[in-house]
Image (tube, helix red, strand yellow):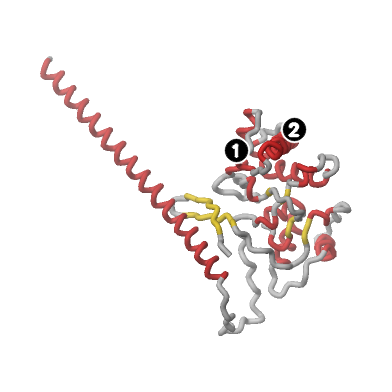
Amino acid sequence: MNLLGLVFSLLALLSFGASLAIDKQMAAKRLHFSYTGNAVAHRHILNHYESELYSSLKSIPKESEKSEDPKKEPRLPPPPPINPPCARLNLFPLLEQSEEEKKVLYETAAKFLRTFYGPTLFEKKPKQEYVLLSSLLEEMKKERIKKGSISFEKIALPNRELSSLYYKMLKGTKKYDSAKKIGYPSFLDYFKLDSTPSKICLNHAHPHLLSLFFPEKVAISLYATIHKQNAPALTKETIERLFQEAHLPLLQSGWADLFEFETHRHTKQIQTTILGYDPDTDISVRKVISLRK
């Protein structure tokens, strides 16, 4: 019996040791996986940053060596990974005027929340977007009075449930595809706080944002029209024509007040957000960088 007990004890020790060795190996593999993915994502951010700096240097433009085939259909540029700051909805006017005075802006912000986060985060609760938006605006007004400056990341909502929702919205998911209903974007990609009056720039808007305001057919045609080579200036009449071609009813009057149609180049942002991604490990990293003038 003593011999049998000794054998069982040795087997137990061996199995315990083997289990520890396997756990240690798995932990090392996960650490290596995470380190490799983050390194690749940060390398992409560094490459993008260096390209931005290089393109900002003054140089003599080179003439294209090969003329493009006029018969070949030009490819549209891929949409940016992050909706640019000029095409974000500015909530600052809602801090200075009431929701009734800025009803169109308030309703548009609520539509953003309902469309982007309703199906995934609001659990089919009616009017949840209005509850969250009103709570957020109230806290931002308090923060502005207390500290004089505000930022979305530093706002803490008093309601625990709303605070948890807001944190998820700020963070967003790794993957977002509105057509396939996968995930949701970061709140910071579609909203901003700017004391200078600003509208949504249609010429640089992400297709996901266009799909919020226009039917799918019109949004696709509009993106293609904007990014065609030597495209004409975008006007309200151009968009109305796209509605007619798609045999769809026009939007209600006043819709154009939210948008900037001019094609002028925006002032280069000192700070910008860059997204780095490693397809092998599916790790993505967002980083705010400063581009010195």
Which picture quadrant has residue 161?
A: top right
Of tags 2 and 1, the one toward the viewer is: 1
Q: Secondary structure at mark 1?
A: helix
Height in image: 199 above or below 51? above
Question: Dot 1: few (<14), some (14–19), or many (≥20) neighbours within 10 Å?
Answer: some
Which picture quadrant has residue 143?
A: top right
Question: Dot 2: few (<14), some (14–19), or many (≥20) neighbours within 10 Å?
Answer: few
Identify the residue at horizontal 64%, vertical 38% (top origin). 155
Identify the residue at horizontal 82%, vertical 40% (top origin). 98
Q: Nearer the viewer, residue 57 or 44?
A: 57
Q: Residue furthest right?
A: 253
Identify the residue at horizontal 73%, vertical 60% (top origin). 202
Label 2, label 1: how far apart the Cα atoms are: 20 Å
Height in image: 70 above or below 145? below
Q: Nearer the viewer, residue 274 or 223?
A: 274
Q: Secondary structure at mark 2?
A: loop
- Percent position of residue 272, x then y: 59, 56
Q: Amino acid at mark 2?
A: Pro
Q: Which residue is mark 2?
A: 126
Q: Residue furthest top?
A: 1
- Percent position of residue 151, x then y: 64, 44
Left or right: residue 79 compared with residue 234: left
Residue contact at pointers 2 and 1, CB within 8 angstroms: no
Residue 167 image label: 1
Does residue 104 appear in this view?
A: yes
Does residue 128 appear in this view?
A: no
Residue 16 image label: none
Identify the residue at horizontal 73%, vertical 72% (top origin). 231
Height in image: 5 above or below 293? above
- Percent position of residue 31, x then y: 36, 44
